[in-house]
Amino acid sequence: MHNSGNFMKDYLSLNYYERTKSVQNRLKEKSYDAYLVCNAENRFYLTGFFADDHFINEISGYLFITEKKILLATDSRYVTQARQQTSGIEIACFNKYPEEFIPEILEKLNVQSLGFESNRIAVELHNKLQRNILDQNLNVQLIPDPAFVGDDRIVKDPGELDAIKKALHIAEKAFLRMLEFINPKMTEKEIAWLLETEIRQGGADSLSFDIIVASGPNAALPHAIPTDRVVGEKTPILFDWGARLNGYCSDTSRTIVFGTPEKDFIESYNVLVDTQKMATEAIIAGSKSKEIAQKTQDFLDERGYKETKFKHGLGHGIGLATHESPSLSLLRDNTLQENTVVTVEPGIYIPNRWGIRLENMIVVKKDHSQILNQLPVQYDMI
């Protein structure tokens, strides 16, 4: 993480104290008297302790919150880092399995019922923990509550919005620099590596996610993996990329072409530009995400793209995670809140030929939507 040790003081001045205090106050309204945070983004959001947990069975810190106490349990790999990056909370170092030390902490904190992130704790750990609690005759009830902290992250404060803009700025500058060096004889892998290099050299801490560079028929696969395919001329090339800076992510998609593409591609591209514009204009505080997603689908249906329109979501929230609440899709009906950051990424995919996706990042405002991207939406950028 970029300058992680002084992150709170020198970069965003995040109000970790106020965030944890809010959680503590809201515990009074819950059926449990303590809450366990294991999600890496939620943990960072509340404390400033930053560590990526790449696997479902890898959790670098267990954050226990009661009305009067905050305790972060970690192991010897992270304890020094945790003490450097946090303040005002107790740090405990355990070189044991979590199902062994969690009951000890619950007993120490006199916890009777524990809310936990059921979307982060593996079933195996939950079962072992439950058995150990019973074996030790602890009267502790485990209560799943996956969104108690995560929902707090939906609305971004000014510091978070600034961080997201900085990450996006790095990503877009990197893309423009990459365009100066690529040519139609390069492979998808070579172009992806060049873009990654530009992102990292441009100041990013890391990528938001693995870069997608997909040409021709590969572009019809929404989450294609770069291959050794030479991109060629007159062939659409779909890019999906993002930069991560100080924990915050960007996410953008563009589709470009070397030379003059086929006529039906140009027609489809222009329709998709109109689709994205229509969806973006519909995004204001209080609007319903499902209605916007349906309106976008109908817009493409009416223009003859019923079979080739995108089947994935129209967009998603973005911040500390590349994909977070709220979802803009037909599957969930969310009421959009002011100062939420979402993506708008409609697509058209024709199997075995090509695909187009255009993705911008949007801030939801009271009576309008603010596009954060400065990068043009056009296929003839090279």
Image (cartoon, rainbow, N blue to C red):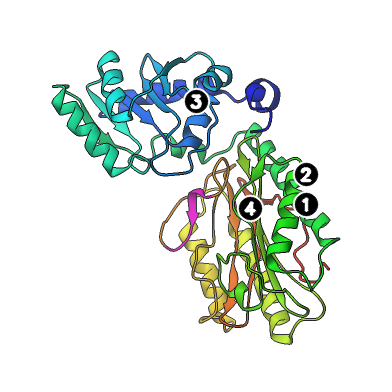
Query: Dot 1: what SS?
Result: helix
Q: In the image shown, does 27 or 324 lie closer to the viewer?
A: 324
The structure residue drawn at horizontal position 52% and vertical position 37%, both measured from the top left corner, is: 52
Q: Which mark is first along the chain, 1 or 4?
A: 1
State the separation of the CA atoms marked 4 and 1.
13 Å
Q: Residues within 10 Å of mark 4 (few under 14, many from 20)?
A: many
Residue 342 placement (x, y as % from top left): 58, 51
In the picture, the quarter occupied by the C terminus is: bottom right
Q: Is residue 357 visible?
A: yes
State the separation of the CA atoms marked 1 and 2.
8 Å
Identify which amino acid the numbered label 4 is placed on. Answer: Asp
Asked if disc 1 and disc 2 are in contact, CB closer than 8 Å, the reply is: yes
Query: Dot 3: what SS?
Result: loop
Q: Farthest residue in the bottom direction? A: 263
Identify which amino acid the numbered label 3 is placed on. Answer: Arg
- In this view, the mark in front (4 or 1): 1
- Report the magenta residues as a range: 323-330
Residue 187 placement (x, y as % from top left): 72, 69
Q: State whether residue 299 is above or below residue 7.
A: below
Residue 269 placement (x, y as % from top left): 69, 75
- In this view, the mark in front (3 or 4): 3
Determine which residue is flagged by label 1. 174
Q: Which mark is first along the chain, 2 or 1?
A: 1
Determine which residue is flagged by label 4. 251
Identify which amino acid the numbered label 2 is placed on. Answer: Gln
- In this view, the mark in front (3 or 2): 3
Q: Which mark is first along the chain, 4 or 3?
A: 3
- Judged left or right of residue 73, residue 224 is right
- In this view, the mark in front (2 or 4): 2
Determine which residue is flagged by label 2. 201
